[in-house]
Image: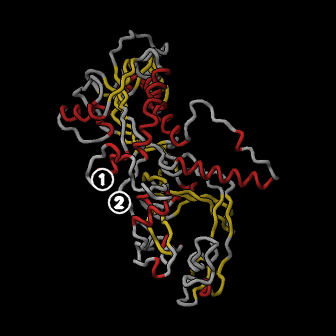
Amino acid sequence: MHDVFVTANDGTKLMPTTRFRARKLLRAGKAVILQHQPFSIRLTYSNNHETQPVELCVDTGSEHIGISVKSEKHEYVHAQYDNLPDEKQRHVSQKMYRRTRRNRLRYRKARFDNRKKPEGWSAPSIRHKKDNHIRLIGMYTEVCPVTRIVLEVGQFDPAAIQAMEETGEVLQGTDYQKGKRYGLANLREAVFTRDKYTCQVCGSSVKDGVILHAHHIIFRSNGGTDRINNLLTVCHKCHTPRNHRPGGKLYGLKPLTGTYKDATFMNIIRWYIVNDVKERYPCIEVRHTYGSYTKASRRDLGQLPKTHANDAYAMGEFHPKHRHHEEHWKKVRRNNRCLERFYDAKYIDIRDGKKKSGSELSCGRTNRSIPRNNPQNERIFRGQKVSKGHISVRKGRHSLQAGETVVYKGNTYQVKTARFRQNRKLGCYETVEFKPKSKEYKVSDVKPLRYIGGGVQV
């Protein structure tokens, strides 16, 4: 845990202190707890307001944020914070559920064409990450006498990065204008041309009479994009729901090159963060630096390992010898907002007598244009119907969330999942599952130790 931040009885921000000294002040009644994240105390007696220059260095990033709060002799915070990875998918789901609810009420005239975005608008996924940077900076400046804020801003060239990964050559001049889709009508044609109109799973081509599809290697439900490197030519015999599930031929494939979402994010948002911080804290000196300077500084400080927290430590003017151990914080969801869940019907497979779901014994169609009676049709093997398909709607909020810490029989565990159970004798009760174990326990038998509050320490 980081050092304890201190404020005077009149609200003046003082220099941080050690946890040992903070405990002594609290026990003696000379201080009271101000807040828990970050842990801060407020003195109850008058003292001299003597402070030193303090530097807050932030290694900005799309997924990970490095924080280092330090003075000339001590480092008080050395931490890494992880953003939510699925913010865009959550907003897409919210939009889908909202439109479904509106359509159930009555017909409403479409009004999406008369909307105008306000000045400074940004996409929700980008705004979330930008706001998280601002929130972390404000969290420490509120309780620490920060005199200087240093932010790392980077400019990336996704096209050049992709070319280096694929060919090892540097793009020059008109190479930026002649990409993989140069001279082709659309993206679908570019994918088929690259793969020579041949299925990349079974090797069939259009000469064999198959229909070709452009398959997303990383599924769109998992955040996959329409980049040409994320698309693959697959025939209709291989592009089936069974092959999309775990164990199938299309499941778990990886594109040749990585995604460049993070580089694009930094190009969009880097100056928004700098200008916003300058506007919010006019009395604090705000500087910006670049990754090349950080890399050189990290090398001059004794070849420090490449971590986001070490990058933040290598920035700025202060590099104290008294280091702090690294903390790793991961932002998590406070609530599971999935209120509706579908449970598929169960059938007996007449081939082996095993119980299987309706999706496993399906007709193999990926869209309605494909005839139901095709070679992949397995509906004909459905035997006796064991259970009906149904929709379960959650009507209560779980008292414990995933990631929270609980005590059970004297041992400390971390909550994995929580759910409601229905029993004829016991009625409706809530159960919880721990991470090290796979057995469910009643919530009434465990004692909560620490709530996550939107973030959990890894």
User: Where does residue 67 sit, x and y in percent of width and height?
Assistant: 37, 33
Q: Give me the residue at 40% from left, 18% from top.
A: 145
Q: Which residue is mark 2?
A: 256
Mark 2 nearby-residue class (10 Å; few <14, some 14–19, many ≥20): few
As helix, strand or loop, the secondary structure at mark 1 comes to: helix
User: Where does residue 164 sit, x and y in percent of width and height?
Assistant: 29, 50
Disc 1/disc 2 C-alpha distance (Å): 9 Å
Q: Nearer the viewer, residue 112 or 416?
A: 112
Q: Give me the residue at 45% from left, 43% from top.
A: 83
- Amino acid type, label 1: Glu
* First in sequence: mark 1 vs mark 2: 1
Q: Which residue is mark 1?
A: 165
Mark 1 nearby-residue class (10 Å; few <14, some 14–19, many ≥20): few
| Quadrant in which the N terminus is drawn | top left
Residue 19 appears in view = no
Looking at this view, name the residue that lies furthest to the right: 106
Residue 124 appears in view = yes
- The image quadrant that residue 302 belongs to is top left
